[in-house]
């Protein structure tokens, strides 16, 4: 992303991680330094969660009337993969996106059951305490379908390889509140050939088989 900004000659990336985990060798700062791209990136590791970073961002973008003056053109969420953390994160992220800005989610069909076999923890989540549905259902897909697709602030949706979910903030402000008729809005599906895509498709096929569909 930083090299794309350099090529475009405009823009700045803020990359947020958590105080809970250590950056290893080489650190993101060292990689950026080596690539000569440090000036395009601010690394933020002040909060335990990006959800709290976004709370500060929301405060700083909100005026005294409660109106939000958004500042981001693109927000990429590649983190916890958990309903609780990422649900609030996408909700606030939408408020911070400029008209026609894009939100991108990685790991759409990722599940604890499939991707953390034999593990007791994943980031801050104690996997031994999860219910069956929390372990087996993809949290980010639920976030995409239940919180993003139904949000009238977004007007375009693209799913790639059942793994990447894109949503565009409408270029013009729309009505607020849930969709009036409760209808769902079209999602364009695209295939990008990657090994990850193949894994995601196999996972989905297995999940659908298991549910008898
Ligand atoms: C799958 S890695 C992706 C990192 C980076 N996008 C990349 O491709 O190298 C997920 C990252 O999310 C961070 N993370 C997980 N939960 C987080 C949270 N609640 N707040 C901030 N960062 C979090 C982890 O520390 C980790 O660096």
Image (cartoon, helix red, strand yellow):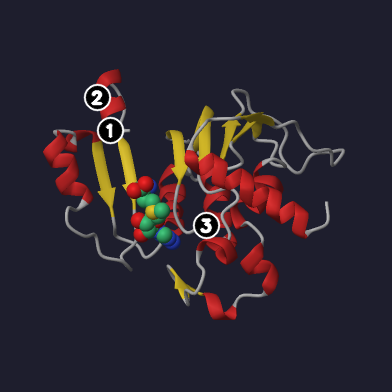
Q: CA distance from mark 2 to mark 1?
A: 6 Å
Q: Nearer the viewer, mark 3 or mark 2?
A: 3
- C-beta proximity under 8 Å, tags 1 and 3: no
Q: Which mark is residue 2?
A: 1
In the image, residue 149 above or below residue 78: above
Residue position for label 2: 6
Name which of mark 1 and mark 3 comes first in the sequence.
1
Q: Which secondary structure, mark 3?
A: loop
- Look at the image and tell me whether residue 114 can be seen: yes
* In-image side of 211 versus 192 (left or right): right
Q: Position of residue 212 (x, y in %)?
A: 83, 56
In the image, residue 182 above or below residue 6: below
10 Å crowding of disc 1: few (<14), some (14-19), many (20+): some
Q: Which secondary structure, mark 2?
A: helix
Name which of mark 3 and mark 2 comes first in the sequence.
2
Q: Position of residue 163 (x, y in %)?
A: 56, 43
Mark 3 and ligand 1: say if the CB distance to the nearest ligand atom is below 8 Å.
yes
Residue position for label 3: 81
* In-image side of 94 versus 204 (left or right): left
Residue sitting at x 16%, y 35%: 35
Name the quadrant where ligand 1 sits. Answer: bottom left
């Amino acid at each position: 992303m930083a090299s794309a900004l350099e090529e475009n000659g405009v823009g700045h990336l803020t990359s947020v991680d958590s105080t809970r985990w250590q950056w290893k060798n080489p650190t993101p700062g060292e990689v950026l330094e080596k690539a000569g791209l440090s000036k395009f990136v601010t690394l933020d590791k002040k909060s335990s969660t990006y959800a709290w970073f976004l709370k500060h961002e929301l405060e700083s973008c909100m005026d005294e009337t409660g109106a939000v003056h958004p500042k981001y053109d693109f927000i990429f969420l590649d983190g916890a993969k958990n309903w609780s953390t990422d649900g609030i994160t996408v909700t606030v992220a939408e408020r911070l996106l400029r008209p026609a800005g894009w939100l991108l989610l990685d790991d759409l069909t990722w599940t604890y059951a499939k991707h953390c076999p034999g593990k007791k923890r994943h980031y801050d989540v104690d996997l031994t305490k999860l219910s069956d549905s929390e372990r087996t259902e993809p949290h980010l897909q639920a976030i995409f379908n239940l919180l993003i697709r139904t949000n009238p602030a977004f007007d375009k949706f693209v799913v790639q390889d059942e793994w990447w979910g894109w949503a565009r903030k409408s270029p013009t402000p729309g009505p607020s509140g849930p969709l009036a008729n409760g209808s769902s809005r079209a999602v364009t599906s695209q295939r990008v050939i990657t090994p990850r895509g193949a894994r995601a498709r196999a996972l989905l096929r297995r999940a659908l088989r298991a549910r008898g569909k």
